Amino acid sequence: MNSDRKICIQFHAFDFTAFVRGENKSAAAKCVVKNLFDLTTQDLEGFDAVVDAFGAWTADTIPQHSASLEHLCDILSGTKVRLLIVGGAGSLYVNPEHTVQLMDTPDFPEMYKPLASSQGKSLSELRKRNDVNWTYISPAADFQAEAERTGKYILAGEELTLNKKGESVISYADYASPW
């Protein structure tokens, strides 16, 4: 995924517009090539929701998670536009007291800790904002790109939730499903 990719969805009849930094590789019929840090409030006028699907995985780009989310919050501040942030499972709590997050457990993969930490920091910063209509959405811990859409998934809160087999798994297709 392009590290500067943001997808904005206009929910009227599921019409959507993709905002991308480079070449249009999305399925969007409407596509705007524009760096997310150059987006303005005017660019997002008329949208019901903005889906923040920012992705950065290298040591030098991971800090952009906070910067990009702060920018989106700033330009959506005071508007009615819903900001939906695609997060990660690392920020989910593993205990009912909400004192331990999945990323802090011994079995959490070391290679994902920098990303999870950055996304967790972004979520902490987001929680301080009361001027933006936001929802943070974390996928299951096992996020399967190639798996089929099943229509079966668990909607839960801030705690890691397991299925009957003791798994936390979802396909990209189910995660992207509107219902």
Image (cartoon, rainbow, N blue to C red):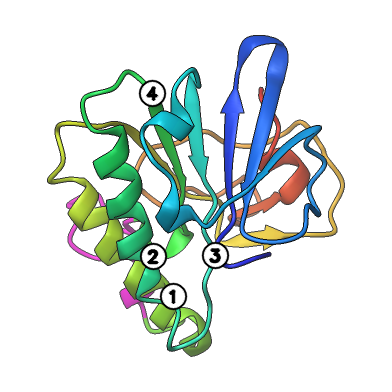
SS assignment for the magenta stretch, majority? loop
Location of residue 128 with respect to 154 vertically, above or below: below
Q: Are marks 3 and 1 in contact (CB under 8 Å)?
A: no
Give yes or no for residue 148 being in the magenta stretch.
no
User: Mark 3 and mark 1: span between their CA atoms?
Assistant: 9 Å
Q: Between disc 1 and disc 2, whose residue precedes?
A: 2
Q: Where, by quadrant of the figure, is residue 22 drawn?
A: bottom right
Helix, strand or loop at label 1? It is helix
Q: Earlier in the sequence, mark 1 or mark 4?
A: 4
Residue type for callout 3: Gly
Tell me the quadrant of the picture where the N terminus can be found.
bottom right
- Residue sitting nearer the eye, 169 or 17: 17
Numbered tag placed on residue 81 in the rendering: 4
Q: Amino acid at mark 2?
A: His
Q: Which residue is mark 3?
A: 55
**Residue 120 appears at what percent x and percent y?**
31, 63
Q: Earlier in the sequence, mark 4 or mark 2?
A: 2
Secondary structure of the residue carrying tag 3 is loop
Q: From which residue to which does the magenta span run? A: 93-105
The residue wearing badge 1 is 115
Residue 142, position as x, y percentages in the image:
63, 62
Which residue in the structure is indicated by mark 2? 65
Query: Against 28, is 23 above or below?
Result: below
